[in-house]
Image (cartoon, helix red, strand yellow):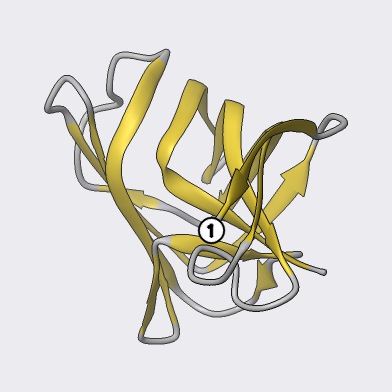
Amino acid sequence: MRSGLELHDSRVSHIELLNGDAMIYFSHAYIHKSNGTPGRDRGTGWSQEARLVLSEVRCDLAIPKVPNTIAEGTLEVGGIKHEIIPLPFKRRVPATLWMVFINGEKFELAAQRSFVELLSAPIYLEELS
């Protein structure tokens, strides 16, 4: 089964910038699971705690007020824009994270490497068709 972390509707609990790395913590990462393509084909929706790590970052905007829910967002890696980040995810090429939160705040980071860590057991939410 294939999985993906959908940025839209995921909840960021906090953001840490430390030694050139950014850690975006999700208290609720919306995870699609499917035998086909997550987010497009029939499957299931799950909630899971997760952390997106961006290494060697350049931050263009102030850190947004969190906790906050993402209204829309993409992670662009190698010229491909992911609204749903494929899992597992670990890339050693430049990436740009762009998010708009439900309160209208925008946040963008550029990094040299990125990866996602799932931090807790997934919690089943719903069937997706």
The reply to whether residue 128 is visible in this rendering is: yes
Q: 40 above or below 107?
A: below
The reply to whether residue 97 is visible in this rendering is: no
Q: Is residue 11 left or right of residue 71?
A: right
Q: Is residue 52 left or right of residue 65?
A: right
**Residue bearing mark 1:** 129
Q: On the image, which quarter does residue 8 sit in?
A: top left
Q: Position of residue 2 (x, y in %)?
A: 75, 70
Q: 70 above or below 89?
A: above
Q: Nearer the viewer, residue 68 or 15?
A: 68
Q: On the image, which quarter does residue 34 sit in?
A: bottom right
- Residue at image coords 46%, 75%: 94
How many numbered circles are shown? 1
Which structural element holds mark 1? Answer: loop
Q: Position of residue 6 (x, y in %)?
A: 49, 51
Q: 76 above or below 114?
A: below
Q: Nearer the viewer, residue 47 or 79?
A: 47
Name the outermost residue toward the left.
104
Q: 22 above or below 86?
A: above
- Residue at image coords 63%, 77%: 92
Name the outermost residue toward the bottom.
79
Q: On the image, which quarter does residue 55 sit in?
A: bottom right
Quarter placement of the N terminus: bottom right
- Residue at image coords 22%, 25%: 102
Q: Position of residue 9 (x, y in %)?
A: 40, 35
- Residue at image coords 57%, 52%: 128
Q: Is residue 79 left or right of residue 34?
A: left
Q: Position of residue 75 (x, y in %)?
A: 41, 62
Q: Residues within 10 Å of mark 1 (few under 14, many from 20)?
A: few
Amino acid carrying label 1: it is Ser
